[in-house]
Structures are given as C-alpha cells and as structure tokens.
Image (spheres, grey):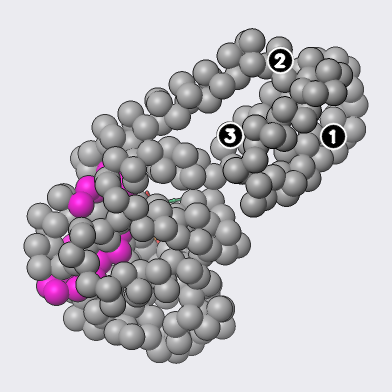
Amino acid sequence: MDKIGIIGATGWLGRALALNLLDRGIVPANALVLLNRSGPSDLFAAHPAVTWAKDAASLCDQCGTLVLSVRPEDFPVAGFAPRDHLVLSFMAAWSMDDLAALAPAARIVRAMPNGGATTGQSYTPWLARPDLPPADAATVTRLLSAMGQSDRIGTEDQLHYLSALSGSGAAYPALLAKAMLDDAAARGLPPEIARRAVEAVVCGSAGLLAGKLDSLSGLLDAYMSYRGITAAGLSAAHAAGFEQSIHAALSAALEKARSMTPQ
Ligand SMILES: NC(=O)c1ccc[n+]([C@@H]2O[C@H](COP(=O)([O-])OP(=O)(O)OC[C@H]3O[C@@H](n4cnc5c(N)ncnc54)[C@H](OP(=O)(O)O)[C@@H]3O)[C@@H](O)[C@H]2O)c1
C-alpha cells in the first residue's frame, strides 16, 4: 500500500484513525505520514517510526493516499495540492464538487465516521464517484475498518442524511437519558438511584436490540400485548408525538447538513 498521509492527525478523529490503524496492525508505522499545526505529539510515542511532515506539500509528495481530518473552516490547508492521489475527506461542508474543484486529478472520497471511532465502533458511510477504481475502494474500506464498520453509499444527499443520523453518535440517547433523569429528579428520586436506573435503560438495554432492528415492531407489539405499565407509557409517548419529534429532529439536522458550505 502507498504511504498514507493524515492532515489533522492529532485531532479527535485523525488520531482515532491513525492510532487504530497502528494499534490494529492495519498499516505499519513507517507507512504513515502525519501533519498537524502544533508539530510532533506524544500521542504517537509508542510508534516512533511514523513520519511527521513539515507541511502539506511535503505530505502530498510522500503519500499516495491523503486523509483530510481538519475542521471545514481550517481548509484548504496551505500547500495542499493533490495530483493523482486518493483523497479521503472526513470534512462536513466540503462537497464532492468543492473538493474536485481543488483537486481535479485526484480520486475523491467523502466519509462520515461517528462518535464510536476511537473505540473501533464507528459506523462510517462513504461516497465516491461511480468510476472509483476497485483498488481504491478496497483501500478506503481497509482504512475505515480501523474505526469500525463502513458502507459505500450512492449519493451525497444520503451522506447528508447519515451525517444527521449515525453522525449524531450518542446525542439522541443522551437526550433520552437527560429527559428520564429530569423526570426522575422532578419526582424526588435520589440522583444516584436515578442514574443507575436510567443507565440500565439507555446503556444496558441497548444491547438487547443489537442485530435485531429488523424485528422492532414485533418487540414493541410484545411490550404492548402485556397491556401493563410499559404499554401505558409507550401509548402516551406515541400520543404525545415521540415519533414526530424524532422526525423533526432528523429533518432539521438534514437541512443543516445540506445547507453547510465551506465558508
Ligand atoms: N469529531 C467527530 O465526531 C467527527 C465526525 C465526522 C467527521 N468529522 C470531521 O472531521 C474533521 C476533524 O474533526 P475533529 O473533531 O477531529 O477536529 P479537531 O479535534 O479540532 O482536530 C483538528 C485537527 O486539524 C489540525 N489542523 C488544523 N488546521 C491545520 C492546518 N492548517 N494544517 C495542519 N493541521 C491542521 C489540528 O492540529 P493541531 O492539533 O496541531 O491544532 C488537529 O490535529 C472535521 O472536518 C469534522 O467535520 C468529525
């Protein structure tokens, strides 16, 4: 495999990729070229064979694959001038067309990892033009496998939608947990009891759903069939617009993703 250059290698996401690539043995340290603003970092002390590029131009010269993991507002980085490189961008706002205008000879890929990236539990949708060579698709899949699962998707609008959905990471579970904690506090439950109870629901029970999302209706029907306490709660949540509020949230997030521009 060509050398891989990561611009933004010490940021939250860049380091998740780089360290998982190294720690999982997907890429040897001498195949990784790193760039940030602040210079070589102790984060990579266990991997002394990585190369630190002096600037983006030097990184482009040394690598066949370039990963863009800087914030959208910090891009373009001075000296970044890909030629026939494979460019894998994690940036929101910079569309395929925006990136292609900057790097017309490059093969551009956009990918959107999520909050599970550091622990290898990301779900990462990625997008490329239909004529991306199979070898490049294999490289992308291999690199992204360091952070978890990935899927190639078909359109930029799907990437926008998935930025709103899987890109939200723990945000909606956190909102659910907060609402439950606030409700428990309002009813006078001791905070430590409330935290353990809510954690059992939001974290502990989530595992029961893993791999079973195709049978959610059956599961909800089963809860309803008891006609008991949980059924009363589910009915009230539905009547109060629980599903509509999720739809409204994802619609607003999708519109935000669609409307973001580089500047
Ligand atoms: N965080 C997420 O969950 C997530 C998910 C999907 C996609 N993304 C995208 O991933 C990108 C990175 O996000 P992040 O959260 O990792 O950001 P971050 O933690 O702020 O990291 C940004 C990185 O970019 C480097 N950098 C900034 N300007 C630079 C320049 N001119 N030259 C070289 N390096 C430069 C920084 O270097 P210094 O450390 O030296 O300043 C740092 O390593 C963003 O575009 C974001 O939209 C993030």
- Judge from the rendering whether residue 214 lies leftward or rightward of residue 10; answer left or right: right
Query: Could you tell me which residue is drawn at 67 percent across and 16 percent down?
Result: 237
Between discs 3 and 2, the one toward the N terminus: 3
- Magenta: predominant secondary structure element? loop
- Give the percent coordinates (x, y) of residue 4: 33, 78
**Classed neighbour count for the residue bearing mark 1: other residues with Cα under 10 Å, few (<14), some (14–19), many (≥20):** some
Label 2, label 1: how far apart the Cα atoms are: 21 Å
Identify residue for label 2: 235
Q: Is residue 62 above or below residue 216?
A: below
Q: Is residue 93 above or below residue 178?
A: below
| Residue 62 on the magenta segment | no
Between discs 1 and 3, the one toward the N terminus: 3
| Res 172 label | 3
Between discs 2 and 1, the one toward the N terminus: 1
- Judge from the rendering whether residue 65 lies leftward or rightward of residue 105; answer left or right: right
**Classed neighbour count for the residue bearing mark 2: other residues with Cα under 10 Å, few (<14), some (14–19), many (≥20):** few
Range of magenta residues = 78-96
Identify residue for label 1: 197
Q: Nearer the viewer, mark 2 or mark 1?
A: 2
Q: Nearer the viewer, mark 3 or mark 2?
A: 2
